[in-house]
Image: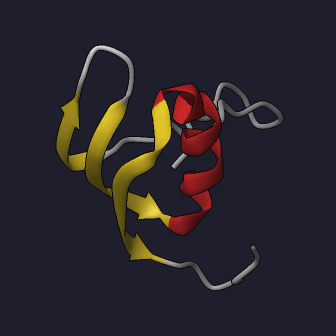
């Protein structure tokens, strides 16, 4: 849920990863598993951390809900 600053202005919802398991070396994340509240949070989270991910890593994502409007 986003926080209402006024009737016309709201802060964007915060993305929170829960139940995180992470294994990394000095350069990249090798294993990462977490739970997100919504599948729609995946893209912004990936964009923020993609520089730490590698092709050799294993990444698992669990979502509480996909939402009423499924759009990828």
Q: Residue furthest right?
A: 8
Left or right of 19 on screen, residue 52: right
The residue under the point 71% across, 82% down is: 69
- Horizontal and vertical percent position of residue 51: 57, 26
Residue at image position (18%, 36%) is 23
Q: Which residue appears at 26% of the width and 54% of the height?
A: 33
Give the farthest residue toward the front.
56
Name the residue nearer the viewer: 71 or 1: 71
Colour setup of the view: secondary structure
Q: Nearer the viewer, residue 23 or 13?
A: 23
Q: Which of 23 and 35 is in front in this view?
A: 23
Residue 15 picture location, percent across and down? 47, 41
Q: Where is residue 57 in the image (x, y as percent from the top left)?
A: 37, 48
Identify the image quadrant of residue 44: top right
Task: Please identify the quarter of the rendering in which residue 2 is found.
Answer: top right
Task: Count up the numbered dots.
Answer: 0
Tell me: residue 69, above or below residue 10: below
Indicate whether 6 appears above or below 44.
above
Image location (x, y in percent) of residue 70: 69, 83
Q: In which quarter of the image is the C terminus?
A: bottom right
In depth, the one of 27 and 37 nearer the eye is 27
Q: Residue at coordinates 48% horizontally, 40% vertically from top-left?
A: 54
Q: Is residue 55 left or right of residue 21?
A: right
């Amino acid at each position: 849920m986003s926080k209402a600053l006024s009737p016309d202005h709201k802060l964007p919802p915060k993305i929170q990863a829960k139940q995180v398991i992470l294994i990394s070396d000095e350069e990249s994340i090798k294993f990462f598993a977490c739970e997100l509240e919504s599948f729609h949070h995946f893209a912004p989270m990936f964009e923020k951390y993609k520089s730490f991910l590698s092709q050799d890593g294993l990444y698992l994502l669990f979502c509480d809900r996909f939402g009423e409007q499924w759009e990828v």
